[in-house]
Each structure stands twice: as structure tokens, then as C-alpha cells.
Image (cartoon, helix red, strand yellow):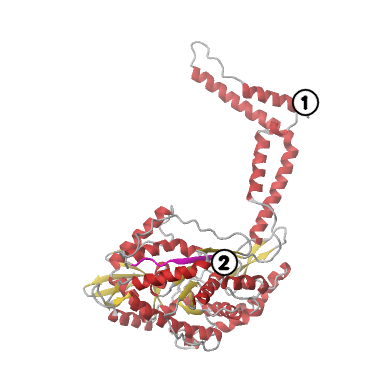
Amino acid sequence: MLDPRCAAERPWVRQHLRVPKSDGSLYARPELSDAEQVLASNRELFDAANPNLQGRSLQRLRAWARQSVLEAAVRYTSALRGVDVAPVADPSVPLIVGGHQPALFHPGVWAKNFAVAGIAARAGGIPLHLVVDNDTLPGTRLIVPSGPRERPVLDTIAVDVERPAQPWEEARVLDRGLFESFARRAGEALKPWGVRPMAIDLWQDAVAGAHLTAAINPSRRSAGELPGGSLRDAFTTIRHRLENRWGLQNLEVPLSHLCQLDPFLWFTGHILANLPRFREVYNTALGQYRRINRVRSRTHPVPDLKEENGWLEAPFWVWREGDQVRGRLMARQEGRCVLLSDGRREFARLKLAPDMDACCAVEGLREMSQQGIRLRTRALTTTLFSRLCLADVFVHGIGGAKYDEMTDRICSRFFGVCPPEFLTVSATVHLPIGPAYNVTAADERRLETLLRDLEWNGDRHLSSGWNADADTLRAERLALRNQREPECPPGMSCRKVRHRARVERFHRFQDLARRIAAFTADQQQKARAELAQIRQQRAANSVFRNREYSFVMFPEEKLRGFMQGIAGIDPRD
């Protein structure tokens, strides 16, 4: 039941979030200047909320989670920087959290990290970035522009060899030579465009990051077990060290580390102990989201939680160390135990029931981790834990903001907590590869309309007296247009007579249109040539204005001032 001190659940509203279009533009909702007001409101909400999570209050679980996660973040961040980061003296100060997959993402995603840093600095709090390494690695190639300026195309450069889809957590460098030569190849690809990518000067950080010691990865026993190194750590290191040089003090922690901490396992136990009710709330919210947003796919934005032969699907991934494919976690209550399965075999029995605390369940889940069984969050569970049990303010990108309306419903309907507000941040920065052409979709539509009119209404584009034959055809078409319906002879069906006349008139209209169009051949040729040029220029603009280029492809001078401005950092510092 929703906390009575909260307002009624907000009505569903179809979201229309749009990425900014112009170069060097920032999108923030609410405005970053309002973040401190959001922070204060959220902290009041958490102080008032008092749900029981398997015998622990939300306040107690939040304090435990923040302490544990920040300790893990200090360890991981120290390894990223190569120096010891001071422990957090007061975990109760405002905690501003964002997160993303450990990819070499584009500046629009990167803007979130700087927004998190700026909000934390103004609030006297701690900025934390969650490295979402439980998601699937989509590929190991980055896009670059290629070809002549008149007809540019998108090409790709390999960071490492391709491999089957697998969780980021398991992804290793497979071709060390290819990986270490990436910066040189990126520089060669961008040299014709007059761009010196930051990768040239920074890639040694990625190479070093791939071989961080096993101390930062609790699930690995020795660095020798990481042949070729970790792609997650490589990409996180290059990004984090650059942010640090630009003035950010964000802490970092992979979700794979967070998911092994006792507070998260307690949170997991609460969901597993009440899975039938959680599944009903989850699927209902998901169905409402699809109806409001007119989504027909049964897998978008996430699939429903299924029921199979008495086993209920839980909102977590599970797989064994080294596996390439994530599996669904299935659970079933049996007496005072919750049985866990990956859909093929049962692998754990937890002492857990709705009226029990989660101490024994935490011990069982911890043992699973020690046996190499990965239990990881799924998308909604990630933000649910982060927003409810960890952050004072969470910063989303546009994609996450759209589906987190469902998380809001789960907060209120399952936990009985008013959903804390979050911020949505995105940006657009164009790779400086030359000015785009001044053409738009409206220019293309105008010429397409003109060509259709020249073909079927050519008489509108011919001057009277220009050509005697054309004038004769125009006059005949005008007379045909003004022709009245024929009279019906006695004894004949009026409908049939008029239908026959209309068919004949239609075919005559088409014939005249084709004959008149022959006199507009020169105009059509000119319009087609202009249309082809505009289409070519618009295709080129899709390369020039593509917002998906990785931040490592940019020259430092293009990004540094813009990103530091989001964080409120003086570039002169």
C-alpha cells in the first residue's frame, strides 16, 4: 500500500523525450539548477518512508548499502587511478548516482557523469558511477567517418576481435596486438578529416587498465586468470583517468561487485521471499506502460516475468563464471525454503519465507557467488535498488528515463514508498569533421512534390503562348476539367452511363497529363538533379551530425570545455 503521507500515484503520461539536435547542446529535465531541490525532497521522502524489508527498515538498509557500496567503490577507484583514494568519512552525506555500460560511449551519454559530479559538488556530496557490467557487450567496433567529403559514409574500427554476445563482466581482450594498435588505427582513419583523436594520447591507460590486479575483482583469484585483460576495466580506466584529469572526483563501482555485497543480497532476498506479489506488480506496470506508449512488442522495453510449471521468473540474471549467455533466474517457494534454478537445473535452496528475515538467504546467496554462480540485476532491478536503497538523486539518460515510469510504480505498489525523483540528462556534440550542408527534409519534400506536379499537372508550369501544341493540350485539359456530367438517355441506367463517362474522362486526363509532361522535361531534369544533390547532402549530414561517435574519437579541445561546463568546473583550474 502507498504511504498515506504521499500524494496519490501520478497518472501515466506518454513520455516524449527527445535528444538535443544542435552541436554543443544539453538536455536536462528538470534543469540542473533544480537538482538541489530534488535532493532535498528525496531525502525528506526517505526519512518518512518505513517499509519492512524482511525485518529491516528502509533507512537501515540504505545506511548499510551506502557504507558497503562506497567501500567497494573506493577499492575499485583506487585501482583505476593507481593511487589510494581516501575512504569516505561520512556515508550519510548526499550521494548522487549515475551509471552506464562500460563502453567507449558517445558524449551524450558521457554528459551524465559530469552532471553527477556537478550536483554532488554543489550539494557537498559524493558522486558515484555504476559500471553496468551485467549488460551484454554489443560489439567491439567503433564508428568513424570514411570516404570523400562529398559522399562520406560510416565505417568501423575494431578495438578487438568480434565474439559471441556475452556479459561485459566476462569479456576479455582476445587479440592483444589488435587491441594495443587501436589508437594508431583511429588516428590514421581520422587524419584525412583533420582530427587528432584523444585515443592517441590516452590509449596507454586502456592498455594498463586491462591488466588491473585481481584485487578489484572479488570473483577472480589471481591476475593470471585474466588472459588478455578485461575490456570492462580497460574502457573504464581510460574514461575515469581522463575525467580525473579534467577535475572530476567520481567514485566508480561495477555492478558485478555491488551484486556480491550483503545489502544487495538482503534486497534480493526480500524480492524472492515475496516473488508472487512482486511479479504481479511488475507485469501489471509493464502492461500499463505498453498501453500508454502504444508498444506492441512483448519484449519491449523488457519482457514479462514468466511462470513455468510452478516456477516464477525473478528479475535477475544468473549464469556461471565463464559462460557466454545470461540465463533467467527461476524461483519456487517450497515450505520455508526458496528454490533457485536457471531453468535447467536447481542450484540453490535458501532458507527464506515472507515472514522470515533474510540472514540465512544472504549466506546462501553469498555461497553461490563463491561457487562461481553469478547473480546479477536486470534493468529495472538495477535502477530500483539504486534509487531506493542507495542514491539520494539518480541521474538517468533518456532511455532509462522512459522505462523508469515502471520503476516508480514498483516503488509505490510493492514497497509502499513514494518514488524518489530522478534527473534526465543527455547532450549532443558533433565530431569536428567539417560543416554540414544547409539542407533539410523540407527541401527534399518540396522537390518531390514539384516532380509529382510536373508529371501530373504540367500545365501549371507552362506559360501561355510558349508552345502552340502545349497550349492546345492545356486548353483541352481545361475543357475536360469543366465538362459536365452527361445526360441520361431514356431507358438506360443513369449510373452505368455516368460511370462509363467518368472512366473515359479519367483515362483522357491521364493521357493529356503525360503528353503535357513531355513539355516539362527540362524542368523535371533540373528538379531531379537538385533532388539527387539534396539527398546526397542529407546523407552526408547523417555522417557529419552523427552523435554516436565515441568520446575517444574527439580532439580534447572539442569536448573539455563543454563537459567541464556541465560539471561547473572552470577550465582554467
Residue 572 image position (x, y, % from top left): 66, 78
Task: Indicate the position of residue 443 as horizontal and vertical percent values.
Answer: 66, 47
> Where on the picture, by quarter, is residue 524?
top right
> Which mark lies nearer to you, 1 or 2?
2
Residue 450 relative to residue 251: left or right: right
Q: Amino acid at mark 2?
A: Gly
**Is residue 496 located in the magenta-colored stretch of the structure?**
no
Q: Residue flagged by tag 1: what amino acid is it? A: Ala
- Which range of residues does the magenta coloring cover? 417-427
Which quadrant: the C terminus? Answer: bottom right
Secondary structure of the residue carrying tag 2 is helix
Q: Is residue 316 visible?
A: no
Left/right placement of residue 142 relative to residue 523 reads left
Towards the viewer: 316 or 415 = 415
* Residue occupied by mark 1: 468
In the image, taking residue 552 as reference, residue 195 lies left or right, namely: right
Residue 417 picture quarter: bottom left
Residue 80, image quadrant: bottom right
Residue 108's disc number: 2
> At 50% across and 10% down in the image, what residue appears?
490
Q: Earlier in the sequence, mark 1 or mark 2?
A: 2
Question: Which residue is found at the position 56% from the left and 19% from the top?
Answer: 485
Asked whether residue 422 is drawn in magenta, I would say: yes
Q: Secondary structure at mark 1?
A: helix
Q: Quick check: 70 above or below 279?
A: below
Query: Residue 284 at x, y = what percent?
Result: 34, 59
Q: Can residue 544 be seen here? A: yes
- The N terminus is located in which quarter? bottom left
Q: Separation of disc 1 and disc 2 at Cα?
A: 61 Å
Q: Is residue 73 left or right of residue 146?
A: left
